[in-house]
Amino acid sequence: MLGAFVLLGSVLGSTLATPYTSPVGYMDLFKRISSGCSTTGPASCHNTTRETDLCCFEAPGGLLLQTQFWDTDPSTGPSNSWTIHGLWPDNCDGSFTENCDPSRDYTNIAGLLTDQGASDTLSFMQEYWVDINGQNEQFWEHEWSTHGTCYSTLKPSCLPSGSPKGAEAVAFFQTVVKLFKTLPTYDFLSQAGITPTTSKTFTLSTLTNAIKDATGVTPALNCDGSTLNSIEYYFNLKGSLIDGEFVAIDAPSKGSCSSSGIKYPPKSGGSSTTTSGGSSPTGGSGNLPDKGTIHASSTGGLLSAGTWSTQTLATYHFSGTTKSFTMSTSKGDCGVSDGQLTCGSGVSASTFSARIRLQVTSGGNLLLAYSGSTTFSSDKTPSGTDQETVYTGGSHSKTYTLSIISS
Ligand SMILES: *[C@@H]1O[C@H](CO)[C@@H](O)[C@H](O)[C@H]1NC(C)=O
């Protein structure tokens, strides 16, 4: 299997414009729906005229990123493989939309895959598409509803007539798995002599060049503190996400790792003796700061009670890592109860996470997330001394994201 990747790497390395075609493997023998789309047209984001058949041309989310995790705290997935995060359709300029069709927020992804003849994909996912807290099904549902529903080429109306309900989600998971198999980050690095270790650190260019040697393109590497934690591979797409061709491209911007001193620790069954959480060096663009303010994407930000206002923002204290942290203000711990964010003395702290976004043009690149969603909403936009209640999710009329700015 490694041989195929090496070959693929050398092909890509010599001809960067060549479409990135996945090696055909065992899994491809299983039945998949067919889009009927040609792959001879322009790649997504590279059309020169307006494309009208968005079943066969991915738009507006034509900048695809395949994200993978290297989770060591706790260790997640096989010790010699990175794990799948997802495949996200960003807009060509790096902005993005999420949660595009709640009517297709499928539950029981495992059952859907099994019922539609994709149990091979499911068993692969159970090993390589795993949630850090063991909530795999929720993780898959989240990736589908948040990102999968935004693909134009996966609209149900694009499917062959008579396709069962959810067939486009099955195709999504099959495609993500198929693409992931062409991107064995662990092997790409070990081919260059880079294996997990606690005894030395790496420079960003050493790591990036190892991936570039294997794939022909530059990925974005993200760190949690100084520890390598995730990688993003970027593509444009020819044809449909169901069965189109992925064209590998350089990451539009670098990730959050600093240029040197990058740790790539081994995964382990037992806990390691190093302390973690709350001790991230400051200044790195993807690190969770110890304290900062929280800004809303439209205007203003959060006060000490957890309300949204245009008044002077409160200082928030963060404890944990970007993947899992709690936060508090001078009023007390912050928690979500009945979908409502509050900070105060009687509040029990909820766990939040932060999604690293690299193309955010203003504000920070750490987006506050609750239960995996970066969408928050209120009844109206505050002005003057108004304080609006902040709700998790998009159920109220003004939706926005919240970014964490270190202070
Ligand atoms: C490419 O096609 C999309 C979808 O129709 C369209 O929105 C976009 O403007 C087109 N780009 C160009 C340069 O025509």
Image: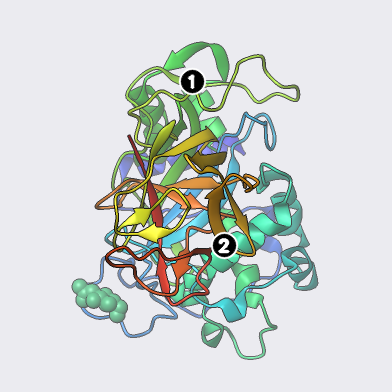
Q: Specify whether residue 292 is in view.
A: yes
Q: Work out whether residue 305 or residue 103 is closer to the camera in this orientation and state it.
A: 305
Residue extending farthest top = 199
Quadrant in which the N terminus is drawn: top right
Q: Is residue 282 left or right of residue 155?
A: left
Where is residue 2? Give x, y as percent. Answer: 58, 35
Q: How many marks?
A: 2
Q: Secondary structure at mark 2?
A: strand
Where is residue 344? Give x, y as percent. Answer: 55, 47
298 in relation to 12, above or below: below
Where is residue 226? Give x, y as percent. Answer: 44, 24
Question: Could you tell me the amino acid type at mark 1?
Answer: Lys
The residue positioned 40% from the left and 60% from the top of the image is: 308
Q: Secondary structure at mark 1?
A: strand
Q: Is residue 11 left or right of residue 141?
A: left
95 in relation to 81, above or below: below
**Residue identified by numbered label 1:** 263
Q: Residues within 10 Å of mark 1 (few under 14, many from 20)?
A: many
Residue 4 image-quadrant placement: top right
The residue positioned 75% from the left and 67% from the top of the image is: 108
Quadrant in which the C terminus is drawn: top left
186 in relation to 19, above or below: above
Question: Could you tell me the amino acid type at mark 2?
Answer: Gln
Where is residue 303? Give x, y as percent. Answer: 40, 51
Q: Work out whether residue 172 or residue 305 is closer to the camera in this orientation and state it.
A: 305
- Mark 2–mark 1 Cα distance, whole angstroms, equals 38 Å
**Residue identified by numbered label 2:** 340
Q: Does any atom of ligand 1 lie closer than 8 Å to the CB of label 1?
A: no
Residue 80 image-quadrant placement: top right
Q: Specify whether residue 174 is in view.
A: no
Residue extending farthest bottom = 161
